[in-house]
Amino acid sequence: QSGLTQPPSVSGAPGQRVTISCTGSSSNIGADYDVAWYRQLPGTAPQVLIADNNNRPSGVPDRFSGSKSGSSAFLAIAGLQTEDEADYYCQSYDISLNSWLFGGGTRLTVL
Amino acid sequence: EVQLVQSAAQVKKTGESLEISCQVSGYSFPDYWIGWVRQMPGKGLEWMGIIHPGDSETRYSPSFQGRVTFSVDTSMRVAYLHWRGLKASDTALYFCARRSPFSNLFDYWGPGTVVTVSS
């Protein structure tokens, strides 16, 4: 149902790097709308990790980085730590729906 | 400090009405859009819609249009989410969130209100 597609899960060992993709379309990411990334721990509110495709808010470690290419966006997490285990969501705006959109979410497991 | 405080968990019966609230502090309430987001048990985030407290302009996600109503009380700095005729499928965690003034993201979030609807 979501207009932004994320892999349901990714995993990596401590210290490794993982990338989470967010695939949209020509009416959202491809229409040059910015992408934000959020991290959510169970039962808590999402927190902004990446704003405007690749900007880290104050307090977010530089292990987290965002990028965008065409109709897709990517969140990279370097130097995985056990505390990175969480659900990650991308978010953008869709001009044809006149709606904000969230991706379906990706659960990161640190092995 | 920007804060969004949401009302307590609610347990309702199908067909009943419900209003939950989101009280803000730490910034100028009329100037920033407030969005509502649903998270059903074990599922992802769904954008429900958004309201501008300054003029009560609202935009609803097509998935929620006609099912919910947003409103605000600017004197009390509170945003409301209202249902008439609750369904079991409305059981979820509901977040309010402030839209950033500089981009299309939501920069501050309330802790969420759990709504449980049973028959």
Image: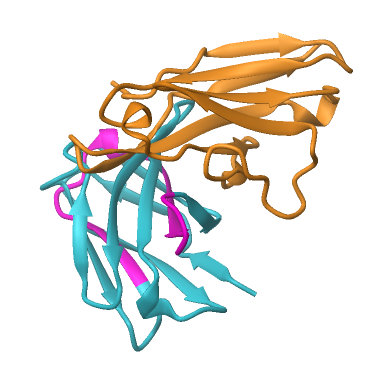
Side of B63 where B78 appears, left or right: right
Q: Position of residue A58 (x, y in %)?
A: 73, 55
Name the residue at the bottom extreme: B75
Its colouring scheme is: by chain
Q: Tell me which corner region of the image, top left, top right, bottom left or bottom right, holds residue B92.
A: top left
| Residue B69 position (above or below residue A24) | below
Quadrant placement of the C terminus of chain B = top left
Q: Residue B103 magenta-drawn?
A: yes
**At 21% across and 76% down in the image, what residue appears?**
B55
| Residue B86 position (above or below residue B33) | above
The span picked out in magenta is B79-104
Q: Residue A62 magenta-drawn?
A: no
Q: Viewer-proximal residue, B115 or B66? A: B66
**At 36% across and 52% down in the image, what residue appears?**
B36
Q: Viewer-proximal residue, B44 or B32? A: B32
Name the residue at the right extreme: A15
- Chain letter, orange: A
Chain B: what color?
Answer: cyan
Name the residue at the left extreme: B66
Q: Tell me which corner region of the image, top left, top right, bottom left or bottom right, holds residue A64.
A: top right
Q: Position of residue B114 (x, y in %)?
A: 45, 48
**At 62% across and 31% down in the image, what residue appears?**
A66
How many labels sit on residues? 0
Side of B26 where B65 appears, left or right: left
| Residue B71 position (above or below residue B110) | below
**At 44% across and 40% down in the image, what residue appears?**
A34
| Residue B87 position (above or below residue A110) | below
Q: Position of residue B78 (x, y in %)?
A: 38, 75
Quadrant placement of the N terminus of chain B = bottom right
